[in-house]
Protein backbone atom coordinates (compact mmCIF):
# COMPACT_ATOMS: atom_id res chain seq x y z
CA UNK A 1 0.00 0.00 0.00
CA UNK A 2 1.06 3.56 -0.63
CA UNK A 3 1.66 6.12 2.07
CA UNK A 4 1.31 9.88 2.25
CA UNK A 5 2.26 12.68 4.61
CA UNK A 6 -0.10 15.11 6.38
CA UNK A 7 0.44 18.14 8.61
CA UNK A 8 -2.44 19.29 10.78
CA UNK A 9 -1.53 22.97 10.79
CA UNK A 10 -1.72 25.48 13.67
CA UNK A 11 -5.12 26.61 12.38
CA UNK A 12 -6.37 23.08 13.09
CA UNK A 13 -4.81 23.04 16.56
CA UNK A 14 -6.08 26.52 17.49
CA UNK A 15 -9.61 25.78 16.32
CA UNK A 16 -9.82 22.39 18.09
CA UNK A 17 -10.42 20.55 14.81
CA UNK A 18 -7.81 17.80 15.29
CA UNK A 19 -10.34 15.10 16.15
CA UNK A 20 -12.66 16.09 13.31
CA UNK A 21 -9.89 15.92 10.71
CA UNK A 22 -8.37 12.66 11.94
CA UNK A 23 -11.84 11.10 12.17
CA UNK A 24 -12.47 11.87 8.49
CA UNK A 25 -9.30 10.07 7.47
CA UNK A 26 -10.13 7.09 9.66
CA UNK A 27 -13.76 6.88 8.52
CA UNK A 28 -12.56 6.81 4.93
CA UNK A 29 -10.58 3.70 5.85
CA UNK A 30 -7.07 5.13 5.78
CA UNK A 31 -4.54 3.55 8.11
CA UNK A 32 -2.55 5.75 10.49
CA UNK A 33 1.02 4.43 10.20
CA UNK A 34 2.63 7.25 12.18
CA UNK A 35 1.48 10.24 14.19
CA UNK A 36 3.15 12.74 16.50
CA UNK A 37 3.02 16.33 17.70
CA UNK A 38 6.02 18.56 17.09
CA UNK A 39 7.06 22.20 17.02
CA UNK A 40 8.31 23.24 13.60
CA UNK A 41 11.26 25.61 13.28
CA UNK A 42 12.42 27.86 10.46
CA UNK A 43 15.07 25.37 9.28
CA UNK A 44 12.62 22.54 8.61
CA UNK A 45 10.07 24.96 7.11
CA UNK A 46 12.69 26.34 4.69
CA UNK A 47 13.40 22.78 3.60
CA UNK A 48 9.75 21.73 3.42
CA UNK A 49 8.62 24.87 1.59
CA UNK A 50 11.83 25.38 -0.45
CA UNK A 51 9.72 26.08 -3.54
CA UNK A 52 8.17 29.09 -1.74
CA UNK A 53 11.21 30.61 0.02
CA UNK A 54 11.54 33.47 -2.47
CA UNK A 55 7.85 34.37 -2.44
CA UNK A 56 6.87 37.60 -0.62
CA UNK A 57 4.46 35.75 1.69
CA UNK A 58 7.07 33.25 2.94
CA UNK A 59 7.83 35.07 6.24
CA UNK A 60 4.10 35.11 7.04
CA UNK A 61 3.86 31.41 6.21
CA UNK A 62 6.76 30.59 8.55
CA UNK A 63 5.23 32.62 11.36
CA UNK A 64 1.88 30.92 10.85
CA UNK A 65 3.38 27.40 10.80
CA UNK A 66 5.32 28.09 14.02
CA UNK A 67 2.36 29.61 15.91
CA UNK A 68 1.62 26.34 17.73
CA UNK A 69 2.88 22.78 17.57
CA UNK A 70 1.53 20.77 14.65
CA UNK A 71 0.50 17.15 14.27
CA UNK A 72 2.26 15.21 11.55
CA UNK A 73 0.90 11.93 10.22
CA UNK A 74 1.69 9.15 7.82
CA UNK A 75 -1.40 7.58 6.29
CA UNK A 76 -1.53 4.36 4.28
CA UNK A 77 -4.02 3.05 1.78
CA UNK A 78 -4.59 2.21 -1.85
CA UNK A 79 -4.05 5.31 -4.01
CA UNK A 80 -3.71 7.22 -0.73
CA UNK A 81 -2.07 10.35 -2.19
CA UNK A 82 -4.91 11.02 -4.62
CA UNK A 83 -7.57 9.95 -2.10
CA UNK A 84 -6.25 12.36 0.53
CA UNK A 85 -5.85 15.21 -1.97
CA UNK A 86 -9.50 14.75 -2.95
CA UNK A 87 -10.57 14.71 0.70
CA UNK A 88 -8.55 17.84 1.51
CA UNK A 89 -9.82 20.04 -1.33
CA UNK A 90 -8.47 23.16 -3.01
CA UNK A 91 -5.56 25.00 -1.34
CA UNK A 92 -7.63 28.15 -0.91
CA UNK A 93 -10.42 27.08 1.41
CA UNK A 94 -12.84 29.59 -0.13
CA UNK A 95 -12.52 27.64 -3.39
CA UNK A 96 -12.67 24.18 -1.81
CA UNK A 97 -15.81 22.17 -2.42
CA UNK A 98 -18.25 21.57 0.43
CA UNK A 99 -17.61 18.13 1.88
CA UNK A 100 -13.83 18.50 1.67
CA UNK A 101 -11.80 19.21 4.80
CA UNK A 102 -10.83 22.69 3.65
CA UNK A 103 -14.28 23.36 2.21
CA UNK A 104 -15.97 22.50 5.50
CA UNK A 105 -13.48 23.93 7.99
CA UNK A 106 -11.57 26.80 6.37
CA UNK A 107 -11.83 30.28 4.89
CA UNK A 108 -8.18 31.03 4.02
CA UNK A 109 -5.54 30.22 1.44
CA UNK A 110 -2.80 30.16 4.07
CA UNK A 111 -4.65 29.06 7.21
CA UNK A 112 -5.94 26.10 5.26
CA UNK A 113 -6.14 23.39 7.95
CA UNK A 114 -3.80 20.74 6.48
CA UNK A 115 -0.82 20.08 4.29
CA UNK A 116 -1.02 16.92 2.17
CA UNK A 117 1.66 15.46 -0.10
CA UNK A 118 0.95 16.09 -3.78
CA UNK A 119 2.70 13.01 -5.23
CA UNK A 120 4.10 9.65 -4.20
CA UNK A 121 7.61 11.03 -4.72
CA UNK A 122 7.02 14.04 -2.47
CA UNK A 123 5.27 11.85 0.10
CA UNK A 124 8.41 9.71 0.42
CA UNK A 125 10.60 12.82 0.82
CA UNK A 126 8.25 14.41 3.36
CA UNK A 127 7.82 11.25 5.42
CA UNK A 128 11.62 10.91 5.63
CA UNK A 129 11.94 14.60 6.58
CA UNK A 130 9.56 14.37 9.54
CA UNK A 131 9.73 10.74 10.72
CA UNK A 132 12.49 8.31 11.67
CA UNK A 133 11.93 4.80 10.25
CA UNK A 134 11.12 3.37 13.70
CA UNK A 135 8.26 5.88 14.04
CA UNK A 136 6.39 4.34 11.07
CA UNK A 137 4.42 1.21 11.86
CA UNK A 138 3.45 -1.51 9.40
CA UNK A 139 0.45 -3.43 10.67
CA UNK A 140 -2.73 -4.85 9.24
CA UNK A 141 -5.92 -3.53 10.82
CA UNK A 142 -8.63 -6.11 11.42
CA UNK A 143 -10.92 -3.93 9.29
CA UNK A 144 -8.86 -4.44 6.11
CA UNK A 145 -11.20 -7.10 4.62
CA UNK A 146 -14.08 -4.63 5.04
CA UNK A 147 -12.15 -1.88 3.28
CA UNK A 148 -10.74 -3.65 0.23
CA UNK A 149 -11.64 -6.57 -1.99
CA UNK A 150 -9.05 -9.39 -1.91
CA UNK A 151 -7.51 -8.33 -5.24
CA UNK A 152 -7.05 -4.74 -3.96
CA UNK A 153 -5.02 -5.64 -0.86
Image (cartoon, rainbow, N blue to C red):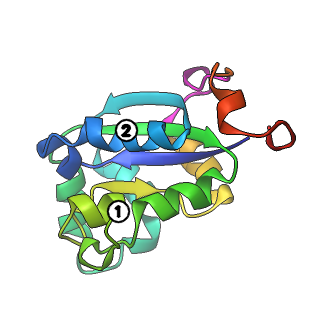
Q: Which residue is mark 2?
A: 22
**Residue 18 location (% of width, % of height):** 26, 38
**Residue 26 location (% of width, % of height):** 46, 36
Specify few, some or many for label 1: CA neighbours under 10 Å numbering under 14, 14-19, or 20 or more.
few
Left or right, residue 15 beside residue 45: left
Left or right, residue 11 beside residue 49: left
Is 48 in the magenta?
Answer: no
Which corner quadrant holds the N terminus?
A: top right
Question: Looking at the image, which is closer to me, 111 or 106?
Answer: 106
Earlier residue among tags 1 and 2: 2
Which corner quadrant holds the C terminus?
A: top right
Q: Which residue is mark 1?
A: 99
Task: Measure the alpha-carbon separation of dots 1 and 2.
Answer: 15 Å
Counting labels gives 2
Q: Secondary structure at mark 2?
A: helix
Question: Looking at the image, which is closer to me, 118 or 56?
Answer: 118
Q: Residue at x 55, y 64 (%)?
A: 118
Say above or below: 58 vs 48.
below
**Residue 70 location (% of width, % of height):** 28, 40
Left or right, residue 114 beside residue 123: left
Q: Residue at x 45, y 42 (%)?
A: 25
Q: Residue at x 39, y 28 (%)?
A: 36
Q: Which residues are magenta?
A: 130-138
Q: Secondary structure at mark 1?
A: loop
Mark whose residue sits in front, 1 or 2: 1
**Residue 78 location (% of width, % of height):** 70, 47
Is 135 in the magenta?
Answer: yes
Q: Residue at x 40, y 67 (%)?
A: 89
Say above or below: 92 vs 151.
below
Amino acid sequence: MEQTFIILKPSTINRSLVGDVITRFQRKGLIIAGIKMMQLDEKILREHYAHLVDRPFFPTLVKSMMATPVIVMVLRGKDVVSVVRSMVGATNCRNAAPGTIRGDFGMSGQENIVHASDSNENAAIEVARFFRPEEIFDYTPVTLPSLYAPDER
